[in-house]
Image: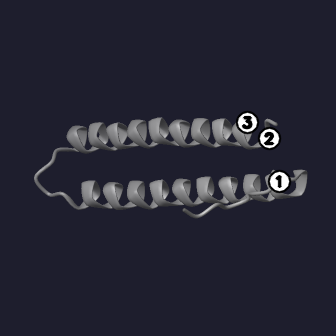
Amino acid sequence: MIILNIPKLTEETRRNYVKQVKEMGEDCKVALRNARADAMNSIKKAEDLTEDQKKSSEEDVQELINKYNKVVDEKIKDKVEELMSV
């Protein structure tokens, strides 16, 4: 059996973890923006779609990106609250 003593988190350690969480959240948002850009480029290059279909597809992609940006924001908020609670 292995016993590990893990010290309680200090205020400074908590703040460092919060910074890391926020950085990870920003990385997620950057990945979402890159995915949106790739999807938009694919839609624009599609020759078999009409202009209305392209516009509709672009709006659908934007709605999905907005939805997942909100999910990322909520997860960040929840994790920050969890880390800062004693």
Left or right: 49, with 51 as reference point: left
* Residue at mark 3: 81
Residue reaching furthest to the left? 48
Quadrant of the rendering where the C terminus is positioned: top right
Q: Residue at x 74, y 43 (%)?
A: 83
Using the image as rendered, state which of residue 24 and residue 14 is in the foreground. 14
Tell whether 5 sits left or right of 32: right
CB-based contact (under 8 Å), mark 1 and mark 2 = no
N-terminal label among 1 and 2:
1
Report the Cα–Cα distance between label 3 and label 1. 11 Å
Q: CA distance from mark 2 to mark 3?
A: 5 Å
Amino acid carrying label 2: it is Met
Gap in angstroms between the C-alphas marked 1 and 2: 8 Å
Query: Which percent across, then down, holds residue 82?
Result: 70, 38
**Relative to 76, is 61 on the left or the right?**
left
Task: From the top left corner, tell me how far across and down residue 51 is, in percent.
Answer: 23, 44
Check disc 3 and give the amino acid type.
Glu
Q: Residue at x 34, y 44 (%)?
A: 58
Amino acid of disc 1:
Arg
Circle 1 sits on which residue?
A: 15
How packed mark 1 is, by other alpha carbons closer than 10 Å (few <14, some 14-19, many 20 or more), is: some
> Helix, strand, or loop for circle 1?
helix
- Picture disc at residue 33: none
Q: Secondary structure at mark 3?
A: helix
The residue under label 2 is 84
Quadrant in which the N terminus is drawn? bottom right
Write the residue at 25% across / 45% down: 54
